[in-house]
Image: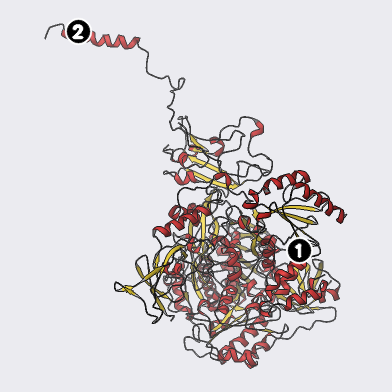
Amino acid sequence: MSLAEKYPKEVKQILAKYPPEHKRSAVMPLLYLAQREEGYITKAAMQDIARMLDISETDVASIVGFYTLYHDKKEGKYRMQVCTDLPCALRGADEFLDNLCANLGIKVGETTPDGVITLEAVMCLAACDKAPVFQTQGPDGIKYHENMTVDKTMELIEALRKSSA
Amino acid sequence: MGVFDPLLELLRGLGTTFKMALDKPVTYQYPEEKRPVRPRFRGRHVLKRYENGLEKCIGCSLCAAACPADAIFVEASENTDEKRFSPGERYASTYEINMLRCIYCGFCEDACPTEAIVLGDNYELSFYDRRSAIYTKEMLLEPVPSVEMTTPRKVEPGVFTRSVPEMKDPQD
Amino acid sequence: MAKQVTLTIDGKQVTVPEGTLVADAAKMAGIDIPVFCHHPKLEPVGMCRMCLVEIGRPVRDRATGQFVMENGAPKIQFMPKLETACTNKVEEGMVVLTRSQKAVEGQKGTIEFLLTSHPLDCPICDKGGECPLQNLTVAYGPGKSRFLYDEKMHLDKQVPLGELIWLDRERCIQCARCIRFQNEIAGDPVIGFDERGRATQIVSFSDPGFDSVFSGNTTDICPVGALTTSDFRFGARPWELQAHASICTQCPVGCNTTLNTRREAKSGGRIVVKRVMPRQNEDVNEIWICDKGRFAYHYTEGKQRLTRPMIRKDGKLTRASWDAATKLAAENFQKAKKNFVILASGRLSNEDLFNLKSLAEHADGKAYIYSHMGGGELTSLVGVGEGTNFGSMGAGTTIVVVASDLYEEAPVWYLRIKQAAARGANLIVMNARETKLDRYASFTVRYAYGDEVKAVSDLAKKGKIGDTFLKSENAVILYGSDGLGVSGSAALASACAKLLHDNGFTGRPNNGLIGVWGRANDQGAWEMGFEVEEDLAKAFKGKTVYIAGADPVADDPKLAKALEGAEFVAVQDVMTTATTEIADVVLPAQAFTEREGTLTSGERRVQRFYPAVPVTGEAKADFAITSQIARHMGIVLEGTSVSAVFDILAASVKSFEGLTYARLAEVRPQWPIVGRSDLYYGGTTYENTQGMGAQLSAAAGRGEKVSIPKVEKEALVRPKEKELLAVPVTKLYDRGTTILPSELLHERIGEAKVILHPETAKSLGVEEDQKVSVSFNGVNGEAAVKLTDTISVGVALIPRSMGLAIREPVAVKVK
């Protein structure tokens, strides 16, 4: 099913925001829409968007590749994205991430066996003063979690696991 | 000048003869006896192997480029983990040196990025015809220390990915 | 002429057209500014920062707008930081310092950064020896790096972007030249960047991978060894290769190429062609070639090559001497008298064709060209002439492409016409189906198969399109054979010629008719006076046939049958084919890589090719074989040297008048300056030092009276119920004898296909990729179904030379 068939109202609304000669600008919101259900963007959806906006599939795929909030593979239900840039690292982000990995029994970039959590290291989340910080990207959108400890995080994960069970 | 002077000279000459006859001879009984070579002697080339038996030569042809006598011919092919000759992607599928052309200057050694070609100690190079002066890769390659180290061989995938090893400055 | 701007680069006064980039201006003045991402054929992006220079601009008085003077000269204000020479356009009075201490430091820093993650691969890298990064590191690099060796990024080294091109992710410096080439020049945006930062990598999202017929060019302009062709991978080091100028023989464009050869142990010590590289000719192919030209040369070295003359004795082909073989052929030709037929293909050179035609004339025989297209005689009447160049077409010129899918038939013309359209030329694309060129067309005209002639005749009458066409200064029409047979294309040619002639678009540069032929030298054959015969089977029956460079037996079972019934068959070819198998005499010819000669391109440019490798076996050049046969028949034909034949040819064929063999080897200075030692500027394309060719004159250009023969209307094929209209189309990679020996291309060639509209397929009850049986006109075969909604319903497209012998539109049964 194409995107326009699935979300006719939203697609129309997004396309209406941009002048027809610049409709390629709609690529970002459309990708976000395509990601809503599955948590990732399928190849078919990229082709669909490319056709809709008259741009090449390569362009769409490059955009998906460029931005860390777009995904082209199916991973865990929640993506836990920990900032490991320099200021965060100085506030113990690296150590936090290592311990979290040890607790979850997975490496960075991997998904827990139950498919709930995928752990990722990302660039600046603009909250250096509240590091260690991470955001969860899931079906309910993006949420920030600041001043985190491993224990607090494990509690959060348990809650997420329960809610998705 | 006395009458005995010539005789004296003769005896002196004979004296030297006798002395030398008792001396240790400098002659080498080649080929039974071989003269040792100096550490930096440049003899026939040898293609070296790593300790694991893989060939050091990666078929880059830089030796052929450096050769002032145009004595070396190299042809390369692609390695796979199923059939690996050397580390990295490339190996020499043909390696020939024409020993009649070679002037043993050692430029090939200098050019080699992996220290694969080394001028060895062997100076016994004689041929009955020109054809046999061309040494092939099989003739130049060092023998493998054990059977399981022969090349080509199957190796674990993703281990031997680098052609050029990290090099240290040469000793000696 | 554009406004000229004078600036100073490194103390040298340079005057260049307005809008020139500083890097290009420096190049014109002979000053090298190092670049990686900048390419003179691509739009500037300023990605690599290699071309950092100091730029100063004269200060203007705000009130008066005049230059502020200081010590009698305009006061120059330098920018506090370095700027990129590849993105800044020249300005009047600008001062550029490319080797100042500050600029040198900037360039050194850029190299140091680029090398932080570049692997130590030079010894095994295919680019090593012709690598811009290598060269610039030596010339402009810091010599030492402050970065740690252990911290280099380690990435995948063998990533196939398709089966033709390989990517080494470690070597890539993210200059995006390949991506930009595909977007801007090829118009196939099939590769792009994925990820970001240090993880940025080139990815192909198409299926099959890197789905573009120009993919090989990205390896030429790649400034590092990141992109390599699977054909040449580890084939040889660049400095070991010999370069020989040649011309591509795969299509009528006539791209200038360089054959790189080397002695090879794998081939038993023979000297072989290792790769085909483009050779700059801004009038023909600029610095590009298509993948077919680059990879389909392997037939010249195949095991199937004929090495010795053979004679059929007791039903078997046996070895014979040249004398015996040519004598036998000559005796039979002489005996045949009027029943002597020559069939030659456009794979032969002008000299070969000239000798064949002369032989036919002297022996009272017929000379036919083996072509699926007609109308060639019109291209020597109102064809394009001297001075015609797609590169000089722009606003004011109309280019009409009718019944041709240029992307598949003549890729470099597609590329050049696309560029002309971007410069403002009116592009009118007329076809019964959608083609890739449609995207760049100002107007597209869609007609039903069978209505080609009408569509062309009505072109000038059609409102806006007609106005544009009639009001343009120059007009060229390229006509092809998409969905047409011999008579159909001849009728179309006639309609096109009439349209051009009636409106005065002939006899001037950039005006006239161009045929999109099937083979490289079809145009030459037409100039020589060869004719096309629609019913070759009839022409062969009971005749004595001399076939040169063609394989009719494999192409068409009907022709195979007809040749069985021929009196005597002599076949002259470079390799064993189905036709040589049935021949009475087989004469081995030299491949184009082994000899010299000239070819006439579709734009009627005569170009020379040169020998690159030694001759295979006892093979002889075609013109020499013909001359030897002629001698046995008591006819004197020049057979000693190509230049001697060319001289006679130039004296006897009117359109060749005034040409000399030497003139074809003349070169002119070209822009951009590529192919010299500075590989970083334009890539590894070769400089043209051995000839840019010369164009023929057309009858209309010589001031002769031209009359266009009347359009003969072809009877339309009317498919009955449960039948479809099948039309022949041309595919770039087909199963032709000159392509099939290149194993590398097999995946792109694929199997026999029948292309249908989804609705047609639905009504037939067939699905994509399903094997169906196809039967028409006594031909039965199997083909896989391919669906596309770019064609009309009720039509089946059958590619030529893919196993189904289709010559003209027919009614077909698909089951």
At mark 2, the secondary structure is helix
In the image: residue C345, left or right of residue C765: left
Instruction: Name the chain letter of the residue that bears numbered label 1.
Output: A
| Disc on res. B8 | 2
Q: Nearer the viewer, residue A146 or C491?
A: A146
Q: What is the residue that sits farthest to the top in this orientation?
A: B4
Q: Position of residue A140 (x, y in %)?
A: 80, 62
In the image: residue B71, left or right of residue C482: left
Under mark 2, the amino acid is Leu
Instruction: Name the chain letter of the residue that bears numbered label 2.
Output: B
Q: What is the residue that sits farthest to the left in this orientation?
A: B1
Mark 2, residues whose alpha carbon is within 10 Å: few (<14), some, or many (≥20)? few
Q: Nearer the viewer, residue C146 or B145?
A: C146
Q: Quadrant of the C terminus of chain C?
A: bottom right
Q: Position of residue B102 (x, y in %)?
A: 43, 39
Mark 1, residues whose alpha carbon is within 10 Å: few (<14), some, or many (≥20)? many
Q: Is residue C804 visible?
A: no
Q: Position of residue C589 (x, y in %)?
A: 56, 62
In the image: residue A16, left or right of residue B29: right
Q: Which residue is mark 1?
A: A41
Q: Is residue C64 above or below residue B94?
A: below
In the image: residue C417, left or right of residue C553: left
Under mark 1, the amino acid is Ile
Mark 1 and mark 2: Cα distance apart in space: 112 Å
Q: Quadrant of the N terminus of chain C?
A: bottom left
- Quadrant of residue C735 in the image? bottom right
Nearer to us of marks 1 and 2 is: 1
Q: Nearer the viewer, residue C787 or C99?
A: C99
Q: Nearer the viewer, residue C699 or C286?
A: C286
